[in-house]
Image: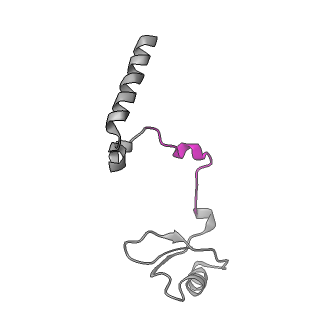
Amino acid sequence: MFRRSGHKDPFEHAGAVIAPDPDMALMMAKECFVRRREGDHLWVVRRSDVHSFEDESILEIAADKSYRFASAYRDVIQKREKALARAREIEHQS
């Protein structure tokens, strides 16, 4: 069961219910997870319909794209000097 509080908020997992059919699952989820107005939207899905990666290493970042964030531009001069030194080191090794 997933719920969200506002129209622009993301859905978040709120819990699980066991029910004989989808309509009963919705009713039980409503009573258990949004009866105190904890959310405005509700999704109920079968556990068998939720999928995940078997090998979670596939989620690792393939390339450094930190340049997309402002924090990556801190200490740019030191980072550039370090990169140049590394490039020289690699050049001398070839």
Rendering coords of residue 83 (x, y %): 38, 28
Q: Using the rendered image of the protein, determine whether residue 58 is visible from the camera's viewpoint.
A: yes
In the rendered image, the quadrant that contains the C terminus is top left
Q: Residue at x 36, y 44 (%)?
A: 72
Residue shown at the point (58%, 54%) measured from the top left: 52
Quadrant of residue 46 in the image? bottom right
Residue located at (37% from left, 72% from top)? 8
Q: Is residue 25 magenta?
A: no
65 relative position to 14: left or right? left
Q: Which quadrant is home to the N terminus?
A: bottom right
Q: Can the viewer see residue 94? A: no
x and y percentages locating residue 54 in the rendered image:
62, 48
Our reading of the magenta stretch's main secondary structure is loop
Would residue 5 be found to the left or right of residue 51 on screen? left
| Viewer-nearest residue: 26 or 66 | 66
Query: Residue 5: horizontal and vertical position, in percent?
Result: 44, 78
**Magenta residues (range):** 50-63
- Magenta stretch holds residue 55: yes
Closer to the camera in the image, 50 or 64: 64
Residue 16: image location, x then y, percent: 63, 74
From the viewer's perspective, is 45 left or right of 40?
Answer: right
